[in-house]
Image (spheres, rainbow, N blue to C red):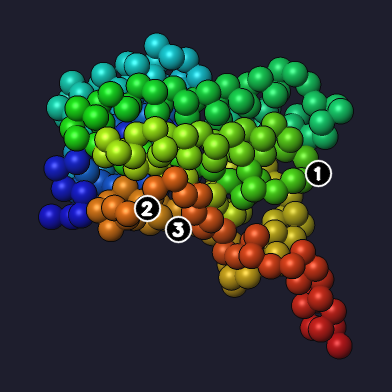
Amino acid sequence: MGKLAARVAIVTGGGSGIGRASALALAREGAAVVVADLVEERAKSVAAEIAAAGGRARAQAVDVADEASVIAMIAAALADFGGLDILHNNAAATDWGVLGGDGELASLELAIWERTLAVNLRGVLLGCKHAIPALLARGGGAIVNTSSASGLTGDLVRTAYGVSKAGVDGLTRYVATQYGKRGIRCNAIAPGVIETPALRQNVPPEQIALFERHHLTPRLGTPEDIANAVVFLASDDAAFITGQILSVDGGLLAHHPTVAEVRALGERR
């Protein structure tokens, strides 16, 4: 029996990367998991992994930017598993067609801005809005939102992405404030650079090497690093933690911005 036995969880963007790792980790701790993804086949694959390991799961196609689709996702959890205890809002617009056009503000196309905020921020809003009544019906629960280090800093590119994640941080605090006395905890995780298939596919090796230099740990993060934090925040181990943005970033934002360059100078001497 795991620490999440008898609980029901939804993971959006659960078909790959951080979402897949989180769905598998929640299931290992005993939760029944609705694996929700825009691409249904990916969700089915992860749900099958969970079932093969002896867990309970169902796949659900969802477009988190569409309210009717989110309502159907919540209804699926209630119909199959009888309630809802955990929501992991993880889905984000990470396809290169969106990220590749998300550059400097003055040249940012409005369509890129609107699509990014629709998925990354409105999607989290809709997930919270429609999960909250189901969580309250069980006496409370936990919401864990995937934010980003980009929501805590400025950057030269990814304007819409960073702003959307800053919005997720603010929304997290509002949910925690409005529903904490009624038993709902809401926190966010701000990952650093995570080695997902999308990272290797879309980011040049020299840029990944730059990221590696600026993390304080010997390696970049893995989806499992984030999944472990999701399990913690969803469990009773985090019963007194709410309204927080937990940086799981290998120290990316913990140091003076010149640390990597100063270290490199020392290594060359």
Sequence-wise, the earlier of marks 1 and 3 is 1
Measured Cα–Cα span from mark 1 to mark 3: 27 Å
The picture places residue 24, in percent across and down from the top left corner, at 32, 47
Q: Residue at x 67, y 39 (%)?
A: 162
Rendered view: 101 above or below 234: above
Measured Cα–Cα span from mark 2 to mark 3: 19 Å
Q: Amino acid at mark 3?
A: Asp
Confirm or deny contact between disc 2 and disc 3 (CB under 8 A): no
Rendered view: 64 above or below 12: above
Q: Amino acid at mark 1?
A: Leu
Q: Residue at x 42, y 38 (%)?
A: 177
Q: Amino acid at mark 2?
A: Ile
Rate crowding at label 3 as few (under 14), some (14 to 19) or many (20 or more) other CA atoms within 10 Å: some
Q: Which residue is mark 3?
A: 225
In the image: residue 267, left or right of residue 247: right
Q: Which residue is mark 1?
A: 156
